[in-house]
């Protein structure tokens, strides 16, 4: 699973939110009952395809 966030400028609040998201993903992945989760941030709409493709390849390698 992928949590994909699209962002323009990053604020301090975004950094804090991402820290908590990283903690949540780690806990869910350690539980093991909900699949493998990852997070990514996209700054430009044109990057979405590349990010999704890269994450899919990583998921297939696990």
Image (tube, rainbow, N blue to C red):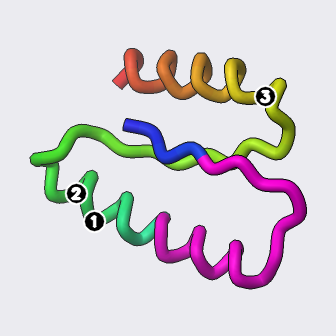
Label 3 and label 2: CA atoms lie apart by 29 Å
Question: Does the magenta-highlighted stretch encompass residue 1?
Answer: no
Q: Tell me: 8 left or right of 52.
A: right
Q: Vertically, is 15 above or below 1?
A: below
Residue on which the image places disc 3? 47
Residue on which the image places disc 1? 27
Q: Residue at x 83, y 25 (%)?
A: 46
- Mark 3, mark 2: which one is toward the viewer? 3
- Mark 3, mark 1: which one is toward the viewer? 3
Span highlighted in magenta in the image: 5-21
Report crowding for label 2: few under 14, some 14 to 19, many 20 or more residues within 10 A (C-alpha): few
Seen from the viewer's position, the closer of residues 50 and 27 is 50
Q: Vertically, is 21 above or below 61?
A: below
Seen from the viewer's position, the closer of residues 9 and 37 is 9
Task: Specify the quadrant of the image occupied by residue 44.
Answer: top right
- Identify the mark nearer the N-term, 3 or 2: 2
| Secondary structure beneath label 3 | helix
Q: How many marks?
A: 3
The label shown at residue 30 is 2
């Amino acid at each position: 699973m992928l949590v994909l966030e699209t962002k323009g400028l990053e604020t301090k609040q975004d950094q804090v939110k991402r820290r908590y998201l990283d903690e949540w993903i780690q806990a869910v992945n350690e539980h093991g009952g909900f699949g493998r989760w990852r997070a990514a941030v996209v700054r430009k709409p044109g990057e979405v395809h590349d990010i999704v493709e890269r994450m899919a390849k990583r998921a297939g390698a696990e």
